[in-house]
Amino acid sequence: MIRAITPRRESSGRLVFTFGALLMMIATTSAAERILPAELAAAPAQTFAGDTDYRLASGSDSRAEHPALHGLCTAATASGHLLETRVDLAQTPILRWRWRVDRGPVGVDPRTREGDDHAARIYLVHERWPRWRSRVVSYVCSLTEPAGADWPNPYSAQFAMVAVAGREAALGQWRDEQRDVAADFQRLHGLQIDRIDALAVMTDCDNTDQPAEAWYGPIEWHAAEPD
């Protein structure tokens, strides 16, 4: 069983990520090449600062040809859904997904704790022992950073943030994204990894207290394209 980042509160009341309690032991599971929104909706909720409102939406409701997981954050909350899945990156290092952001925090610096909110996040976890050596890459849709920007998470350097979609992205439109996960872990963490142990999605607004709303479509793992 995986447990997501365990929250701890400072005297200031701000959320602090204690990386040492990031994960519990993970049972080996077969890799899911295609993760449907229904699977994300059914995955265990992980709460850091109150519960973001998540629901499974139909294709007509999401204005797409497929169902979607809808995340709505309006009350300074931070929670997500965490899916245990062992993915062999030697076979499928490419992650493709669809998402849509309708609104999110603006006028903030996501490199600071006060600005560390995003309408849409996808976390990828690689577990190592001891657990404080585990590493995470978080793909986000940022309304303040340019697409392609990356930075250490302000709560923990074990998390690397990547603005897959940036401030140039149009709100309210579905986007198709793709990343080479193995290459990103190598570039951002200096690690050659052979697997991913968990995937999570999160819409949060606990630090900025600005409304955030996003839709998550299917997520797929693919083999690398031939050179």
Image: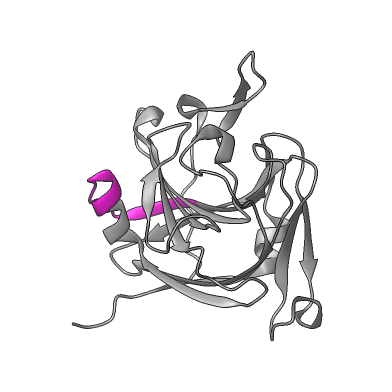
Residue 153 colored in magenta in the image: no
- In the picture as drawn, the residue positioned furthest to the front comes out as 107
Answer left or right for 4 relative to 179: right
Which residue is drawn at the image coordinates 39% and 28% (left, top)? 132
- In the picture as drawn, the residue positioned furthest to the left comes out as 227
Q: Between residues 204 and 90, which one lies in front from this camera angle?
A: 204
Q: Quadrant of residue 59?
A: bottom right
Q: Quadrant of residue 99?
A: bottom right
Visible residue check, residue 2: no
Answer left or right for 30 relative to 48: left
Residue 189 colored in magenta in the image: yes
Q: Quadrant of the C terminus?
A: bottom left
State which region is magenta: 186-198
Rendered location of residue 83, percent (x, y) = 58, 53
Reply above or below: 52 against 222.
Answer: above
Visible residue check, residue 170: yes
Which residue is drawn at the image coordinates 61% and 77% (left, top)? 174
Reply above or below: 5 against 55.
Answer: above
Which residue is drawn at the image coordinates 77% and 42% (left, top)? 51
Rendered location of residue 52, percent (x, y) = 75, 47
- In the picture as drawn, the residue positioned furthest to the top comes out as 11
Reply above or below: 162 against 167.
Answer: above
Q: Quadrant of residue 49?
A: top right
Rendered location of residue 170, percent (x, y) = 59, 73
Answer left or right for 16 relative to 88: right
Q: Between residues 101 and 179, which one lies in front from this camera angle?
A: 101
Q: Quadrant of the N terminus?
A: top right
